């Protein structure tokens, strides 16, 4: 069984790296969908 993390984000450049680092050992794939960020997301 594989586990995927799907995230819908907007203007989360400040928090996204830490969030992704915290889950990368627990999931097989990470899918990030950006919904029109104005920052570096």
Image (cartoon, rainbow, N blue to C red):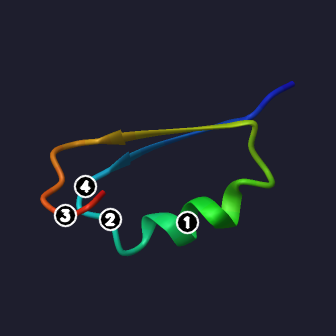
Q: Are marks 1 and 2 in contact (CB under 8 Å)?
A: yes
The tag on residue 12 is 2
Q: Are marks 4 and 2 in contact (CB under 8 Å)?
A: yes
The image quadrant that residue 7 belongs to is: top left
Q: Is residue 36 left or right of residue 19?
A: left
**First along the sequence among labels 1 and 3:** 1
Residue at 19% across, 64% down: 39
| Residue receiving disc 1 | 19
The image quadrant that residue 34 belongs to is: top left
| Residue receiving disc 3 | 39
Q: What secondary structure is marked by label 2?
A: loop
Task: Give how far apart the Cα atoms at labels 1 and 4 are.
Answer: 14 Å
Most distant residue in the right direction: 1
| Residue receiving disc 4 | 10
Q: Residues within 10 Å of mark 1 (few under 14, many from 20)?
A: few
Observer-side mark, 1 or 3, equals 3
The tag on residue 9 is none
Q: In the rendered image of this protein, does residue 11 appear above or below residue 2?
A: below
Task: Give how far apart the Cα atoms at labels 3 and 2 are.
Answer: 8 Å
Query: Where is residue 11 drawn, in percent x and y?
Result: 24, 62
Report the front residue among 1 and 34. 34
């Amino acid at each position: 069984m594989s586990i995927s993390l799907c995230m819908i984000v907007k203007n989360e450049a400040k928090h996204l790296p830490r969030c992704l680092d915290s889950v990368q050992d627990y999931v097989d794939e990470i899918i990030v969908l950006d919904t029109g960020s104005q920052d570096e997301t």
